[in-house]
Image (spheres, helix red, strand yellow):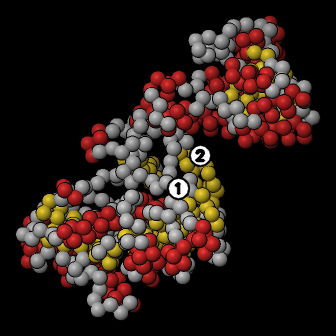
Amino acid sequence: MADMKIKRALLSVSDKSGLAELGTALASRGVELVSTGGTARTLRDSGLEVRDVSDLTGFPEMMDGRVKTLHPKVHGGLLALRNNEEHVAAMESHEIGAIDLVVVNLYPFEATVAKGAERAEIIENIDIGGPSMVRSAAKNHGFVTILTDAADYDELLEELDANDGATSEAFRIRMAGKAYARTAAYDAAIANWFAFGDAFTRPLGAEALKATPFVETMPLAFKRSDTLRYGENPHQSAAVYVPQAVSAAGVPQAAQLQGKALSYNNLNDADAALELAAEFGGGDPAVVIVKHANPCGVAQGGSLVEAWDAALKCDSVSAFGGIVAVNTELDGATAEQIANIFTEVIIAPKVSAEAREIFAKKKNLRVLECGTLPDPRRGGFMMKTIAGGMLLQMRDNGAVPQGDLKVVTKRAPTEQELKDCMFAWTVARHVKSNAIVYAKDGATAGIGAGQMNRRDSARIAAIKAVEAAETYEWSEPRTVGSAVASDAFFPFADGLISAAEAGATAVIQPGGSIRDEKVIAAADEAGLAMVFTGMRHFRH
């Protein structure tokens, strides 16, 4: 393959960004412009001479534009091998002119789904002719140049200038690969919409989660938004991708206001912090401090700075080098306190001008403004690769209203204990299993994460509470008079007894163990109030 001169271009785009400028640049280089419908009108409005596709094919556009480019004179002009005598003879015999450049971007199917359009409108935004032309041009990249992204227009013009009106083989190969990636992603979005409808964007209840089918073939469509310095460890390469089929709100969509580039670990930890902060969206000011994807301090307060102080004092040792997320605008007073310790990343819906000024003194601190908190009850999927395959499950967006809790002990929890139970339970669902969380007065008192047995998690969380009391010279650890949450049932009474020894007075757990009666009896003996949720929240 060699450089290929561009003499005729077929342009048919849904997104008209940069179209007039591209058409003008091509025409000035002597390229004949062929186009369709609205694309042709835009080019003509710019004073350019354009040949209609219907003039090329001899057939008018019909069926509301559904049929216009699906014709041998289009696809013959794209697919013909210019160095094949039989192909050339067929072109001459049927008066098929060669097409050297195709510029196509597809109907906005993904955007139409994302805006919640009706089914009929979504169906009309499934492009047929566009992907067909893209695939034909990309297949014949030895002779034809294909562009599917307006971001590549300038590079095309640079190619033409550098190669006397031609494109290089390397450029055509790269654009062909990009074109097939685009049609693959487009088809994946369509296939997933047919399979799951709006399950990606709406909350699903427990019964709907069970009923949602998992298709035999799962096409995925993600677009790289950034290449990272390295992965979890320096010897691992990494990148971050965002979904193409649906709109999303999260860490990748946040605006970085300052600081070094985000690393793989930064993104993972910031996501964990933001997901938990989102649980308190619309409630009292909340602060979440995360280390290695586990919360090490969480609190709500009358003000954000009050919540920060309470969250930090849960485990100030682990907070060093951590990630901070908040559920409301980050103000100057809170920023001043956060700036007193080494922090890797801060993420908030909004960062005040005063807070920005304070953080600006710490050049390496990464500050993110996410605008909208993600919906903690949204639908969607979670994916995890394993050796030889991939696991796919619906997101854990289940929730248990306070009114659905079942009191199983002789003593019912007090109003304050119940409030602390719900707070502890909210945090526990975001802690790696086995998870134990003590909470008191809207703040975590101790967190035990990722242990192989629940008793050890209870003990570790209690130890952290004792250390905090010693650090801040409290008369007793905050676990005294606290509520304790367990992400899964206590299989034995030992974990519950450890919590009671730490001073907890109320317990919230899923229940469902064959030894529930023994655990309830142990709670009664210790004078604890205990409620069952009936829902487990393992997090691995």
Residue 458 picture location, percent across and down: 27, 76
Please tell me whether residue 289 is drawn above or below residue 538 in the rendered image.
below
Amino acid type indicated by mark 1:
Gly
**Helix or strand or loop: what does disc 2 sit on?**
strand
Asked if 427 appears above or below 135 in the picture, the reply is below
Bin the neighbour count of mark 2 within 10 Å (Cα to Cα): few under 14, some 14-19, many 20 and up: some
Residue at label 2? 223
Of 284 and 439, the residue lying toward us: 284
On the rendered structure, is 63 left or right of 407? Answer: right
Give the amino acid type for the residue marked by disc 2 in the picture: Lys
Query: Quadrant of the image for the N terminus?
Result: top right
Please, what secondary structure does the residue beneath circle 1 have?
loop
Q: Residues within 10 Å of mark 1 (few under 14, many from 20)?
A: some
Q: Is residue 307 left or right of residue 435?
A: right
Quarter of the rendering occupied by the C terminus: bottom left
Query: 221 or 46: which is nearer to us?
Result: 46
Which residue lies at the image location 79% right of the left edge and 22% below the top edge? 44
Please name the residue that numbered disc 1 is placed on: 371
Tag nearer the camera, 2 or 1 = 1
Outermost residue toward the right? 164
Snapshot quadrant of residue 12: top right
Looking at the image, tell me whether mark 2 or mark 1 is earlier in sequence order: 2
Query: From the viewer's perspective, is residue 63 above or below residue 450?
Result: above
Residue 297 drawn at (x, y percent):
40, 74
Q: Residue at x 26, y 64 (%)?
A: 422
